[in-house]
């Protein structure tokens, strides 16, 4: 199994969270997908919680974009 560094996992998680939050205001479908992808890639590091948060925010943005907006 592939393993990435802890520092890279932190960056992927935080960038995924930031992109997800931006998705609430601009391009929610694309930003939600990007947040989920970054979170999934980040799961290959030791930063599991941070990356699960990025995935969750991305999923909420997608649900918001597809069903509420």
Image (cartoon, rainbow, N blue to C red):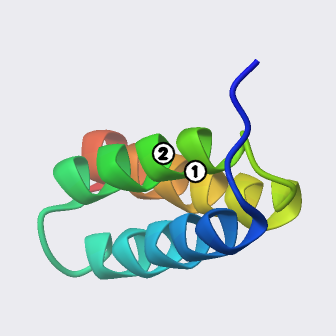
Give the crowd class for mark 2: few <14, some 14-19, many >=20 residues within 10 Å. Answer: many
Q: Residue at x 82, y 62 (%)?
A: 47
Q: Tell me where residue 34 appears, x and y as whole percent.
A: 32, 50
Label 1 sits on residue: 39
Nearer the observer, 9 or 2: 2
Q: Which residue is drawn at 56% across and 62% down?
A: 57
SS under mark 1? helix
Q: In which quarter of the image is the C terminus?
A: bottom left
Tell me how far mark 2 sits from mark 1, CA to CA.
5 Å
Label 2 sits on residue: 36
Is 57 situated above or below 17? Answer: above
Q: In this view, does 9 lie to the left or right of 41?
A: right
Q: Is residue 35 left or right of residue 53?
A: left
Image quadrant of residue 21? bottom left
Q: Tell me where residue 12 appears, x and y as whole percent.
A: 53, 65
Q: In the drawing, what numbered circle is on residue 50?
A: none
SS under mark 2? helix
Residues at circles 2 and 1 in contact by the CB criterion of under 8 Å: yes
């Amino acid at each position: 199994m592939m393993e990435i560094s802890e520092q890279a996992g932190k960056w992927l998680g935080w960038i995924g969270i930031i992109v997800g939050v931006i998705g609430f205001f601009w391009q929610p479908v694309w930003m939600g997908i990007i947040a989920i992808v970054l979170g999934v890639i980040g799961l290959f590091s030791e930063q599991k919680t941070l990356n699960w948060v990025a995935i969750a925010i991305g999923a909420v943005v997608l649900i918001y974009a597809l069903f509420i907006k």
